Amino acid sequence: MKKILFAASECVPFIKTGGLADVVGSLPKYFNKEEYDVRVMLPKYLCIKEELRSQMKYVTHFYTDFYWRNQYVGILEMEYQGVKFYFIDSEFYFGGPWPYSNMYEDIEKFSFFSKAVLSSLPLIGFRPDIIHCHDWQTGLIPVYLNDSFQGDPFFWGIKTIFTIHNLKFQGTWDVNTIRNVTGLSDYYFTSDKLESYNNGNLLKGGLVYADKITTVSNSYAEEIKMPFYGEGLDGLLRARSNSLSGIVNGIDYNFYNPETDADIEANYNIKTVFDQKPKNKEALQKELGLEVNPNAFMIGIVSRLTDQKGFDLIDCVIEQICSEDVQLVVLGTGEARYENLFRFYANKYPDRVSASIFYSEALSHRIYASCDAFLMPSLFEPCGLSQLMSLRYGTLPIVRETGGLRDTVQPYNEIDGSGTGFSFANYNAHEMLGIINYAKKVYYTDRKAWDKMVVAAMEKDFSWNTAARTYEKLYDELLGSNFPIDVDAEKEEKEAK
Ligand code: ADP
Ligand code: GLC
């Protein structure tokens, strides 16, 4: 059995602020359980729903020196949908109302988490062969593993993988503070290690010390080797390109399933989509107070409202997007300027623009199920899950050709009628507007072509089955052909249980 431990800062159903949580919460379910024992370790935030927190069982606790304090570290565990989860308990660090706060506090919090993950391994009866780290919050795990933990033979030979979900967030602060907080020596703060443009950088630690680096689409794996997308680390990623690969995300096809989704008005599948989907549209129009009109071209947006997602383009031409034959349905939270932009237009055109400025899993499903098109004109997009959810529900994505959007949405080809959506190349508002209007034209004047794409979109398979097999291959490659090296130890461990 190959043992893998995921370490991450968020994971459904426990805590979610973005797609990272969907990936960490669903991918582990889809490994071949005969060969891979994949478990997950997370912070035990106080803001996890009580209903879930109360199901966690105490395993043990210990104290550790961290920064200038001696800290309590509790370990809890819980099995959920066949996957074993461990939680690192520290009310001092994880007691806030939200998993993240300001960067300075987060750096301390997640440095603590990274150290606690490693320190707890000898106590939980699970020695991973690979620790699979996700995003900057876990960037120090490969660093610490290479450092003081090498003093204990228990840790010898543990491999690490670092997956980049978003290169923009790096966990940077001044070198002195990071050195003091992490307890790492001067040796680590040079430009070939954790120092980056005069700051300390936790993500960079992960990228330098992990055995393998992956990111969540092939296009993004290429893009980040270039300055425009590289966020200052393109040189390092070029240098490590032999260890870097892209594996496109999937989504949980059991959870995002129009046939069984309890949150939508009318369930449907590929055969019933054209009868049932309009019922969802009508219900959503009623729910949101829009004009009830089956012919309106309904465009959805479900997103963090940040500049990554291309809202500057929308801002520029929103008046033209919101023409009389269009309905725009927005669900999202984020930067005030975008929240207010959509509030303003919802006020101005109450029968055709709706702005839900909050977080709602259930409403997001209704939007995926009800809209005709889904708009995602991102400036950059490591993978993007929303467009995959749209495809699954037969809602055609309109996207910019970047990162995972480029890899997962096949643009409409009017010559042969192929495609699963619409796309444009340059980060340019009028180019986007042109393609929205083109989509609208196809919708209104060639419904046969549109419907053919709806079927093609629903036929696409972006379940985890493909990606999980690719991760398995990567694990195998990393562990080498002689695995398991120590069969006797495995046997002893089993017998001891
Ligand atoms: P990112 O991780 O960059 O935010 P993704 O497309 O990978 O983008 O994932 C976003 C996830 O968060 C999707 O599951 C999307 O449905 C969900 N989401 C974003 N904003 C909201 C919201 N306000 N309400 C409900 N779900 C949301
Ligand atoms: C990040 C990216 C998004 C990706 C998600 C899961 O939040 O912004 O593109 O889908 O991680 O990998």
Image: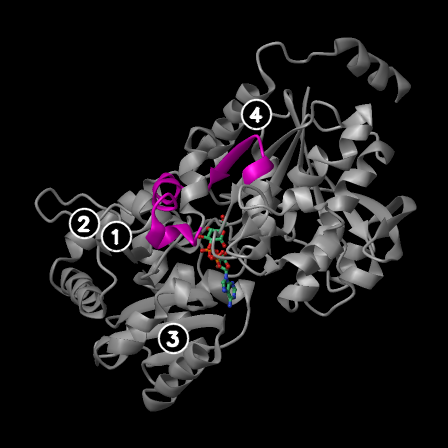
Amino acid at the residue labelled 3: Gln
Q: Quadrant of residue 436?
A: bottom left
Q: Nearer the viewer, mark 3 or mark 2?
A: 2
Q: Which residue is mark 3?
A: 285
Q: Comparing marks 4 and 3, which lies closer to the viewer?
A: 4
Residue identifier under label 4: 475
* Comes first in the chain, label 1 or label 3: 3
Asked which secondary structure carries label 3, the reply is helix
| Mark 4 or 2, nearer chain start | 2
Contact flag, marks 1 and 2 (Cβ < 8 Å): yes
Pinpoint residue 84: horizontal percent, then vertical percent: 73, 38
**How many other residues sit within 10 Å of disc 2, few (<14), some (14-19) or many (≥20)?**
some
72 relative to 469, above or below: below
Residue 372, horizontal then vertical, whole percent = 30, 62
Q: Secondary structure at mark 2?
A: loop
Q: CA distance from mark 3 to mark 2?
A: 27 Å
Inter-mark Cα distance, 1 to 2: 6 Å
Which label lies toward us, 4 or 2? 4
Mark 4 vs 3, N-terminal side: 3
Of residues 208 and 21, which is closer to you in this image?
A: 208
Q: Which mark is residue 412?
A: 2
Image color mode: one colour
Residue marked by disc 1: 421
* Alpha-carbon span between mark 4 and mark 1: 34 Å
Which circle, 4 or 1, is nearer the viewer? Answer: 4
Q: Amino acid at mark 4?
A: Tyr
In the rendering, at what x and y percent does residue 232 appear?
Answer: 43, 53
In front: label 1 or label 3: 1
Residues in magenta, as a range: 208-232
- Of the residues under marks 3 and 2, which one precedes in the sequence? 3
